[in-house]
Image (cartoon, helix red, strand yellow):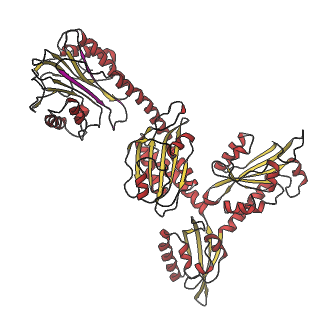
Amino acid sequence: MTGEDARRVSDLSLGVFDSAPVGVAVFSGSGHRLVYMNDSCRCIVGARPHGVPAREMFRDVTHVTLLDRVRSTGEDISLDEVPLDYRVSPVIGQKRYASVSMSRIPLDGGEHGVMVIVAEADRQAESGWWGSSVADERHRFLQLYLSLVQLEKQALWVTDAKGEVFEPCPGWERLTGQAWEEYRGAGWQDAMHPDDRQAVISHWLDTVDRRGLWEYVYRVRRPDGAYRHVHTRAVPVIEDGEVVEWVGALTDIEQEWQEERRRKLLERAATATAHLGNLDDVLRTLVDVIVPALADGCAIFLLPQFENGSISPPFVSERLISFARMGSPPSTGSQLIGEECDFVEVIRTRQPILRIFPKGQPPPGSVPPGGEQWAIAEQANSLALVPVIVDGTVAAVVHAVVVGDRERLTAADVELLGRMLDHAHTHLNNAVRFQQTQRVALALQTYLLPDPPQVPGLEIVGRYRASTSASEIGGDWYDMFVTPDGSTILSVGDVAGHHLSAAVTMSQLRNMLRGLAMDRREPPGDILRRLNVATELLNGEHTATCVLGRLEGGAGSRVLCYSVAGHPPPLLITYEGEARFLTGAVDPMLGVAYDRPRTSSVEPLPPRSMLLFYTDGLVKVPGEHLDVGLERLRRAATCLAREPLEALCDKLLQMPMAGQDDIALLAARAARQD
């Protein structure tokens, strides 16, 4: 690559090093891709194409690690007697060594790069230009480079007394690409960012009227269409008490502005999340920082754990949060990733993806499911997908979008986004561990739920639905089986809490209750008393509620013998639509008053009537009295009295308040009497 190519790549005068007698190479970005190499460097390490990553140039991987260190910290590093391979005219048996120096330098777009200076040991002694000290020459090179950068950043300009440009300004032309005829007079204002223009003009004209010092920071458009921040200062030239002209200096401060912005955003992210305790609060706070400082919209997806690193659609991700500065953001909740797309590629490669495109025309597969129409309607112009890696796996993916006429996202923005998300690492780690725990608990819970027994003249349906809002699995269960004497046992229960230990305790209680009720024909209250005593010995930390019922008799003459331990009462619904709660045998919950006697009650079941056992997730609403939820259930069941039993259960689970907690539901209907 020639020096002129380098100037176009980096927009800086790297070509000054083309004829240097030592090797000079410049790498940019976190991947350390080559953007400049002079002829001496080609002779030493071999010609390499623009864009090749440093890891493909250096034999020793530790050198790439050193590049990371220099770029992130600004530390200068020098290495002596680094072994080299001949790339040109190899000499058999001859070994070559070099001194290598690495320094951080500013690059276009607010990024940092690394300049690598390589000098062969024999050339150091022969070359007076190189001098005796690698460190001294590195400093000389760096100062030369920084001086050139500063020179290209500055522009001097002159206006008349009214503030209109009347002399050509080569620095302005180099910065903006405007020709003299375009920026003369007030034409320079056309190169300003539209969002800054009115404020800058107003401030400039006010300063001209006041005849004071003008100082301002604003954005100007580069020839490639990108905007950069500039700092300008101007003073009036006064002769005989009158302003005859204004003289000003303008400096490109994009790098300084980006560094300050980066520092402030990282500081905000750290401060905002410092004392938050749960994942939702942390992510919501981070999104509040990201939008609108970095993007106009942002969504964060929590991913499943992929077995053996195998990542292939379809799979389901959970959109934990979604927020947009304008318009309606995509909804939260489960999202099916059904085909190969950028989202899958980010997970697979563990590398971010940046897409820049015409407004409202995102490339196919670039927007995660659920956000395509929003991105098109809001005229998105760029987006980034950033993986969040926890314990070596991709735990989440962040989707950031910029819309309209706002400057598009850059590689520096993507890197900054990743740094901000590092503040959620601990919480995401906890979320991943919880996800694994929840998967085990759900599998356990599902495995323990039985299929309905076949009982002549009796239809039985069971349903279980996990909470859509609780952060952990609960301890709800149902059970149904036929005893050796032909009675049908129905039970529904709920262990307090939402965690794996609650699910484990639930399974133990359910199995003990089945064992106690299987071969003893005794009242349900006595069975629950014995279960309560066993609960004390099993686990003194948990309490539970339960309703236990025994159905006896045949079609047309069935009776229910039941007992309630701190649980919502069973609901009896006749085929005619009359519904009432059974409140004849109510005792304290399990886990208290261990050896206290418990009551039982008997209720005849009319033909074609329905019996409903359920956990409080079906009726409980935070801040609402339980009686309100019970009445809501009674009215709904009355309206559905003649529905098929499976359809009735499904519709009850779709009630507006259902789903805020786990729900176990058991329904039994006596057959029609022939």
**Magenta-drawn stretch, dominant element (helix, strand or loop):** strand
The quadrant in which residue 65 appears is top right
Q: Seen in the image, is 292 located left or right of residue 499?
A: right
Give percent across and percent down for residue 382: 51, 56
The residue at the point 51 percent across, 83 percent down is: 209
Give percent across and percent down for residue 401: 47, 54
Instruction: For residue 212, say whether it is visible.
Output: no
Instruction: For residue 254, say whether it is visible.
Output: yes
Q: Seen in the image, is 516 located left or right of residue 131?
A: left
Give percent across and percent down for residue 331: 37, 48
- Range of magenta residues: 458-485
Q: Seen in the image, is 360 located left or right of residue 350?
A: left
The residue at the point 24 percent across, 31 percent down is: 616
> Is 208 covered by the magenta stretch?
no
Q: Is residue 457 above or below residue 248?
A: above
Q: Nearer the viewer, residue 591 or 601?
A: 601
| Quadrant of the drawing holding the N terminus | bottom right
Give percent across and percent down for residue 385: 51, 48
